[in-house]
Image (cartoon, helix red, strand yellow):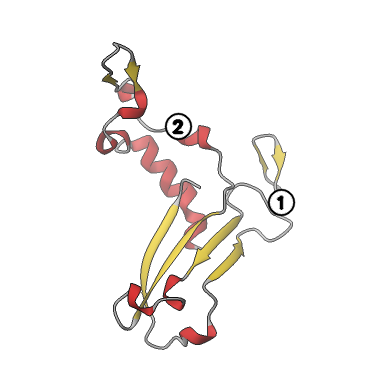
Amino acid sequence: SFLHLHVALDAKDLDLDSLEPHYTVMDRGLEGDDRIMNGLPDGPCGELNMIAVSNPCVLDRTLAPEGYVIVHAYGAGNEPYDIWKSKSNDDETSTLTSARTDGEEDIDSRDSGDRYQSSTYNAMKDARGEALWR
């Protein structure tokens, strides 16, 4: 998955002994909805339908300060890479490359600080990340 959410939550009133370390959340249910994505009908394995949620503090309470837990949520391997690859930069910066010693251009060695600063990339990240916040 390309979208990950890491947050610390106030856990003062949570009984960590009653929680599991891992959960699976079906954002649109087991049936999915009426969406057609990349030519395929939605379903349990539809894009960003299955969200994996981990609470590692259930296993090791020292991973967060006392009174807090860490939650890690992500699309469970159900997100195509190609949509992210094409949105790495706006059109005017999409040719950002660095020279390799053999004279070929290597788009994978771009400075990650520049790579993920485009307005197109950020807008898509915000829209697709919504499933992790619901």
Where residue 11 appears, as percent x and y from the top left, is: 39, 82
Question: Given this view, does label 2 or label 1 mark the residue nearer the observer?
Answer: 2
Mark 1 residue type: Gly
The number of callouts visible is 2
| Residue at (46% x, 48% y) in the render | 127
| Residue at (29% x, 78% y) in the render | 65
- In this rendering, the answer to whether 101 lies above or below 27 is above
Where residue 85 appears, as percent x and y from the top left, is: 45, 32
Residue 49, quarter of the rendered image = bottom right
Instruction: Describe residue 123's horizontal placement relative to residue 42 as left or right.
Output: left
Mark 2 residue type: Lys
Question: In the structure shown, which secondary structural element does the residue marked by tag 1 occupy?
Answer: loop
Where residue 92 appears, as percent x and y from the top left, is: 31, 22
Residue projecting furthest to the top: 103
* Closest to the observer, 99 or 68: 99
| Residue at (42% x, 32% y) in the render | 87
For disc 2, the neighbor class at 10 Å (few under 14, some 14 to 19, many from 20) is: few
Alpha carbons under labels 2 and 1: distance apart? 24 Å
* Residue underneath mark 2: 85
CB atoms of marks 2 and 1 within 8 Å: no
Tell me which numbered mark, 2 or 1, is placed earlier along the sequence.
1
Q: Which mark is residue 43?
A: 1
| Residue at (56% x, 58% y) in the render | 51
- In this rendering, the answer to whether 57 lies above or below 40 is below
